[in-house]
Image (cartoon, rainbow, N blue to C red):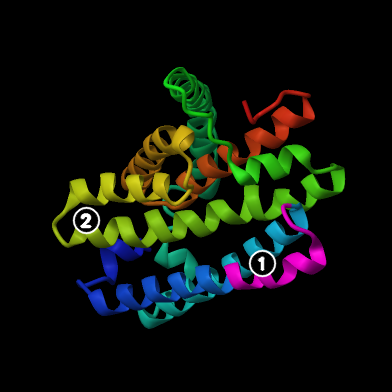
Amino acid sequence: MEPIHQAAYDGNVEEVVRLVMRVLIAFVVSGLAQALATPLLGSGGWPSMVLGQVCLHGAVIASLGLFLRSHRMGWSQGFGLQVGGVARAIGTGVLAGLAFLPAAYGLQWAIGTWLESRGVRRPSQTAVRILVEADALGRSAIFAPAALVAPWVEEMLFRGVVYPFLRDLGWPRLALWGTALAFGLVHANRSVFVPLTVFGYLLALLYRHSGNLLVPVAAHVTFNTAPFVLLALGIRVDR
């Protein structure tokens, strides 16, 4: 079975625009849900963050399901989940994610140090701060949406839909770098923008060469799991 970008786009701009609009609405709705729940769950803590992520991920997955249905395709066929074998795809992705971790943390440290040398306070990631401050229950609750669900949602959207759509319109470089830059920007943090942009580029390359979205998903899951492992080992991840 062929990935959707090889079989079913046919330059259907309208369907992609609809998907983008649904995702934007999902961002707004999840933000409102988190804001409304904050007085009950507490501000700045993990319960409201988890609620916001669950709402966002659920809405985006539903939107992607409608998108695939409009192309008369299932998840496996749409994202090439059987191409090259499941075990091989996961193994390749895990190795790629592990290989990138030293470069990612090195870049983040270098950029944070440079910003401080310029008199700019090192920016902290809200999600990482909440993770560091959370207790064992909180970290367990954060793990599923952050390390397991978010990689699937982001990969299906950025690499599974937007990347191949732009590429098939005749803009291969924009597809690679545009989705990579968007991936870096949506995390809204100066110290991680560069490493996440480079990571986004790597994820797109993994999908391009494998045709199986499981490869970048596995790499992304590995990358997002790293902070939890480091914290379990007593290593701070917000520095």
Q: Which residue is mark 1?
A: 34
Q: Position of residue 175 (x, y in %)?
A: 25, 51
- Quick check: can you spot residue 82? no
102 or 36, which lies in front? 36
- Dot 2 falls on a residue whose secondary structure is helix
What residue sits 21% from the left and 56% below the top? 167
Q: Position of residue 172 (x, y in %)?
A: 19, 50
**Residue 109 left/right relative to 161:** right
- Dot 1 falls on a residue whose secondary structure is helix
Q: Is residue 133 above or below residue 98?
A: below
170 or 30, which lies in front? 30
What residue sits 73% from the left and 65% below the top? 38
How far apart are the alpha carbons under marks 1 and 2?
A: 35 Å
* Quadrant placement of the C terminus: top right
Q: Amino acid at mark 1?
A: Gln
- Quick check: can you spot residue 42? yes
Image quadrant where residue 22 sits: bottom left
Among numbered discs 1 and 2, the one appearing first in the sequence: 1
Q: Amino acid at mark 2?
A: Arg
**Residue 118 left/right relative to 127:** left
Q: Are marks 1 and 2 in contact (CB under 8 Å)?
A: no
What residue sits 79% from the left and 59% below the top? 42
Q: Which mark is residue 189?
A: none
Q: Nearer the viewer, mark 1 or mark 2?
A: 1
Q: Which residues are magenta?
A: 31-44
Q: Position of residue 79 (x, y in %)?
A: 42, 61
Q: Which residue is mark 2?
A: 167
Find out whether residue 222 is within the magenta segment: no
Query: Crowdedness of circle 1 by 10 Å Cα count: few (<14), some, many (20+)?
Result: many
66 or 174, which lies in front? 174
Considering the whole magenta stretch, tell me its main secondary structure.
helix
121 or 214, which lies in front? 121
